[in-house]
Structures are given as structure tokens and as C-alpha cells.
Amino acid sequence: MQKTKKSLKIFAAFIISFSFIITAKAADKLVPLGHTTGIKLLCDGAIVTELSDNVPENPCRAAGIAPGDVIKSVDGNAVTSNDDLRRMVTESEGREMTVEYVRQGEVKAVKVTPVKAEDGKYALGIRIRDSVAGIGTLTYYNPENKTYGALGHGVTESDTNVLIPPQRGALMKSKVESVVQGGPGNPGELRGEYDLTNDYADIEKNTESGIFGKIKDSAEFEKMAQYPIANKNEIKRGKATILSNVEGDEVKEYEIEITSIYFDGEKTKNMLVRATDPELIAKTGGIVRGMSGSPIIQDGKIVGAITHVLVNNPQKGYAIFIENMLDAAA
């Protein structure tokens, strides 16, 4: 999530409840979806969310480790979960350890000596997170290779805004149970339920422009209508629609307006859109968290997907070009 000046405060329209690569074959047409989906993603490593003060002379702070760093291994042993790291620190009994971590794509290694915390156990003086779960919206299904795209932006760790490097992840069937309406200064959200044990797709890529993977059983998607893909130069200001699931299990089409187009803008903020459909505004107040990924249709073509809501005006939000999503999936 990002914050700028007060008038432009925004929230990514994806809800986080706590924290393999595909080759995308070019397609002439996509199936626009708009249904919510449960999302769970296990980090490849452990993300440092905070340096804690429960240890004297914090050893990680002294070694230069900072929030947002992803710890990958200790003494050459891979860290695959929070429990892995805690076990390694406990078993060290205060012995110096070599901690390898990644910061903005660069691999670093430092020596760190665990110290006893207030509870008498050895610790590194950090709080960590290894997974996230939440709800977002499916954007498209690609019939050429049975893949999907969703969200239109990446899944990030909520405290540090670091893009989660996926070890593994999956999508789960979901439905919307309730809606918290958005208002000025108070972005709303979709509240849904999903079964963590019932996966229907893998998450293979988590990028700035969306999450991507393969559908396990694509039979239901094969029956759905396919739409041509719009080149960004075909998109124009004016009327459009979105497909979105804001109630129960139903996807409906709602009217919006594309008010601005930014050809040289950020990857996920290529269009500014405004909700105009009275039914959608009555149900949600406009654009709310959880609608991220809702596909945008204009002149019978898929042009992009909703990505963010403007906090001070929930009837407005940003959207990504579908071209950018497909480039990220490739």
C-alpha cells in the first residue's frame, strides 16, 4: 500500500488478513472473470517486519539487518518458515550464525550472535512473517494455456510493503459474506469466506502487476465468453464497465468512467476510473478493497483491471492496462 499527499492517499484493493514460473502463451482473446478468490502465499524465506526491543543490544540491528529484508538461510540451511528460523536460533545456544538475506534483489550475508531475550530464550531481536492470506479478484482466464491473472498488483507484506517472494501459493474458492462501505478517509472492503484446504489454482508468480498461475480444473472457464484484448492505444476516456463480485457468489457488470489515462505512469496506475453505477455505489460506496483485479471492459474488449482505491474519494480508483498484466505473466 502506498500513501502520498492527503488528496491522493490510496489503498491497494486487496485485503491481507494477517503474511515456478509459467510461460504465458500469447492469446488473441481472454475470458474476463471478476469473481473474488481466496489467496494464500507462503514466502520463500522469512520477511523481517520489525526490529524488536526485547533483547539487549539488538544483534540484527548491529549487523545491519532491517525491516523488509528476507532471511533465506542460516549457516547454509534454508529458512522455509518462521518456525525454521526460531528453531535454528534456539539450537544455536548463543553461537555466532551466518545469516543470508535478500534486500531489493541483492543477496547479503552477515554474522549474527543470538542473545537471550526477556523470556530467557535465545533470539535475534526481530519479528518475522512467512505467509499471507486474504481475498482479491480474478481478472482473466487465458484459454491458450489454462492460466489466470489476478489483482493487477502484487501481494506485499503489510508492514513493510515488500513484495512476497513466493515459495508456494494457491487460490481458493470464495464468496462475499458482507461489504464494509467506503467513505471519505475510510476505504471499504469486501469480507469473504474461503476454504484454506480447497485449492483450485497454483500461484506461480507474484509481480508488481499481479499474481499469475495455472488453473487445475479449467472446465468451467472454458464455457465462458471470450473477449478481445485491447491495446493501450485503443483505450479512451469515457464509459466502460467492470465485472465484479460484491455480493455472495454472483459476478455482475457495473458502469464506470475512465477519466484519465497515463501512458508513462506507474505499472499499476495506468488509468484513473470513477464508479458511476448507482447499484454498485449503493452496495459498496464505490471501489473497495477486495475488488482489486476486477476486469474493465470497453467497446467489447478487455482493457485492464482495478488496482487501487483513492481513500478520500472511494468512488475513484486506479487501474492497470491489461497489456501490463500480460507482460508480467510472460
Image (spheres, rainbow, N blue to C red):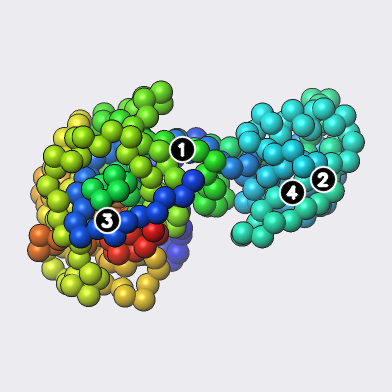
What's the distance in space between the residues labelled 1 and 4, CA to CA? 23 Å
Choose top left, top right, bottom left or bottom right for residue 57. top right
Q: Which residue is mark 4?
A: 100
Q: Position of residue 142 (x, y in %)?
A: 26, 50
> In the image, what residue type sits under mark 2?
Thr
Dot 4 alpha-carbon crowd within 10 angstroms: few under 14, some 14 to 19, many 20 or more: many
Helix, strand or loop status at disc 2: strand
What's the distance in space between the residues labelled 4 and 3, CA to CA? 37 Å
| Pick the front one: 134 or 310 | 134
Q: Which residue is mark 2?
A: 98
Helix, strand or loop status at disc 3: strand
Helix, strand or loop status at disc 1: strand
> In the image, what residue type sits under mark 3?
Ala
Of callouts 1 and 4, which one flags the residue occurring earlier in the amino acid sequence? Answer: 4
Of callouts 2 and 1, which one flags the residue occurring earlier in the amino acid sequence? Answer: 2
Q: Are marks 2 and 1 in contact (CB under 8 Å)?
A: no
> In the image, what residue type sits under mark 1?
Gly
